[in-house]
């Protein structure tokens, strides 16, 4: 079954200044049976952005855990709290939730999750996730 039209596409920004953009078909360039997320170089990943067709964007910064939101009317920056200074090894969290209509079998993406997981220097980890509809 083909993937439904995606409301948000991601861009992965790397620490060397390069970026990788998800294609609308969500097909990996490394392995065509996988999604574009498979292509991301997580070792170099610094910023992960979701963007819609209207230019609205949501970013998570894997350097310190802050979020940035921009839309046609302005934006918001959610600063990482001071306790995030004790976090290391930031990893992106990204997934989509699907719903399949029982009547016609149509696959529909209903929710996108964006965030990060990081380790505390003292042990354990923390996850922060926002959901987009």
Image (cartoon, rainbow, N blue to C red):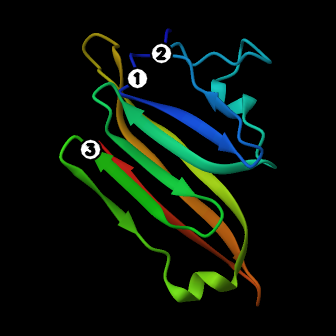
Q: Is residue 125 left or right of residue 56?
A: right
Residue 56 image point, x, y percent: 31, 39
- Give the SS element for disc 2: loop
User: Residue at the location (32% across, 24% down)?
Assistant: 53
- Give the SS element for disc 3: strand
User: Residue at the location (41% across, 35% down)?
Assistant: 51
Query: Image quarter for residue 127?
Result: bottom right
Closer to the eye: label 2 or 1: 1
Which one is in front, 121 or 69? 69
Query: Is the residue under label 1 in contact with that under label 2 (CB below 8 Å)?
Result: yes
Q: Which residue is mark 1?
A: 6
Furthest toward the left, the residue is 73
Q: Which residue is mark 3?
A: 71
Disc 2 from disc 3: Cα separation: 26 Å
Which one is in front, 115 or 80? 80
Q: Is residue 98 left or right of residue 76?
A: right
Q: Is residue 50 left or right of residue 119?
A: left
- Give the SS element for disc 1: loop
User: Residue at the location (41% across, 42% down)?
Assistant: 112
User: Residue at the location (74% across, 15% down)?
Assistant: 29
Query: Image quarter for residue 130?
Result: bottom left
Against 71, residue 120 (above or below) is below
The disc at residue 3 is 2
Residue 108 image point, x, y percent: 34, 23
Query: Image quarter for residue 110?
Result: top left
Q: Quadrant of the C terminus?
A: top left
Disc 2 from disc 1: Cα separation: 8 Å
């Amino acid at each position: 079954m083909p993937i439904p039209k995606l409301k948000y596409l991601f861009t992965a920004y790397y620490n060397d200044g390069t970026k990788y953009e998800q294609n609308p078909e969500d097909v990996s360039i490394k392995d065509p049976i996988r999604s574009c997320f498979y292509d991301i170089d997580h070792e170099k990943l610094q910023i992960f952005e979701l963007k819609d067709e209207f230019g609205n964007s949501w970013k998570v910064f894997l350097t310190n855990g802050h979020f940035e939101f921009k839309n046609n009317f302005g934006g918001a920056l959610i600063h990482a709290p001071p306790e995030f200074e004790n976090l290391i090894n930031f990893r992106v969290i990204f997934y989509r939730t699907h719903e399949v209509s029982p009547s016609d079998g149509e696959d529909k993406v209903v929710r996108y999750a964006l965030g990060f997981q990081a380790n505390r220097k003292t042990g354990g980890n923390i996850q922060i996730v926002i959901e987009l509809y």
